[in-house]
Amino acid sequence: MSYPPFFVYSREGGLVNQFQVTVLLGGRSAEREVSLRSGAAVARALRALGHGVDEVDPAGESWGLPAKTEVVFLALHGEYGEDGQVQSRLETLGVPYTGTDAAGSALAFDKARSKERFQQNQVASPRGILIDSPTSTPPDSIPAPWILKPASQGSSVGLNRVEDETEWDTALADSLQHGGAVLCEECIQGRELTVGILDGDTLPVVEVRPKAGGYNYENKYTPGATDYFCPADLPYKVTAQVQALGLRAYEAVGARDFGRVDVMLDAESKPYILEVNTLPGMTETSLLPKAAAVAGMDFDALCQRMLELALRRN
């Protein structure tokens, strides 16, 4: 099956080419509820653009694509969606899909491997060590406070900030219960930022300010719990540095088409990469759509562009 290199949506003329799209949403990870919301928002947008849309929830092992599927829009988050598994299956089927390929997805989802790749490419990130034992003690090489997070999870699932040794055991047990090893990182004190990337270009920087505590799962998805500022109130030079470092991190893990890079900016305005998200949230209020909107691209147009990027590879 052949496709045009890309197709165009214009507000005046409508959609030039329409496709049969299958949106994969839900899934089997701890981020299932977020994925259902992302997928529902994407499906609404694609239908509004005139595409034929099927929604498939690959929660079980026996899921399949409708025979008429021409392209898959991935709205899955977490395990199976972002770790390269579903991408590998779609590549075997020969069906085009949105976002990073299987190899890049697997690398970006593994926080320890990502950190190694950052170091190899001189991309600044917090110091960190991998922990896989519930009896591990705080590392001597990294001073408190510490950040503990599962090495293979997203949406801040299992993330804990540990102020001192008295909190260590409880926090470590919580992070470990989400499966696999835990990454212990130094806690960079400062401003939390995120850089959206679309087709190799950086979008306006977003600053996130939780009203209480850190930017954990609850503060991400509880309405009103976090304030967002886009574009972030930063000097031009600092904005450029944050965007450049975000793009370098994105390229270092082999991401493609689009993504979101989380950054901490310390008190001296030095940026540190936290992680690369290859399938960021896609509700109308998620961070990547927020940044795209400030850049002049509404949610429907963003979804359309993501399809274009998937289809131009075929």
Image (cartoon, rainbow, N blue to C red):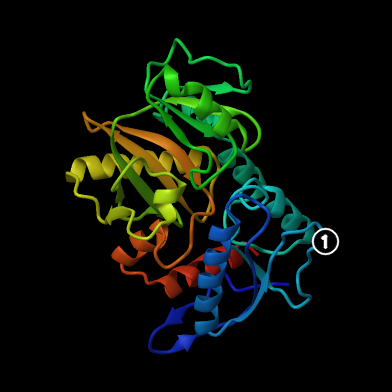
Q: Which residue corresponds to the image point at 53% horizontal and 45% vertical from the top-left?
A: 154
Vertical placement of 9 versus 115: above or below?
below
Q: Position of residue 51 (x, y in %)?
A: 58, 82
Q: Quadrant of residue 161?
A: top left
Q: Looking at this view, is 261 or 149 the one in front?
A: 149
Vertical placement of 96 versus 105: above or below?
below
Q: Which residue is mark 1?
A: 62
Q: Which residue corresponds to the image point at 29% horizontal and 30% vertical from the top-left?
A: 189
Q: Which residue lies most toward the right here?
A: 62
Q: Looking at this view, is 255 or 180 the one in front?
A: 180
Q: Secondary structure at mark 1?
A: loop
Look at label 1 and name its amino acid: Ser
Q: Which residue corresponds to the image point at 48% horizontal and 22% vertical from the top-left?
A: 168
Q: Quadrant of the C terminus?
A: bottom right
Observer able to see residue 272: yes
Vertical placement of 243 versus 46: above or below?
above
Give the left or right position of residue 133, taking residue 144 as reference.
Answer: right
Q: Position of residue 178 (x, y in %)?
A: 62, 38
Q: Which residue lies most toward the top here?
A: 140
Observer able to see residue 114: no
Q: Position of residue 123 (x, y in %)?
A: 42, 30
Q: Quadrant of residue 274?
A: top left
Q: Looking at this view, is 164 or 311 the one in front?
A: 164
Q: Which residue corresponds to the image point at 27% horizontal and 56% vertical from the top-left?
A: 230
**Residue count near mark 1 (Cα–Cα under 10 Å), binned few <14, some 14–19, many ≥20:** few
Q: Quadrant of the N terminus?
A: bottom right
Q: Looking at this view, is 307 or 73 the one in front?
A: 73
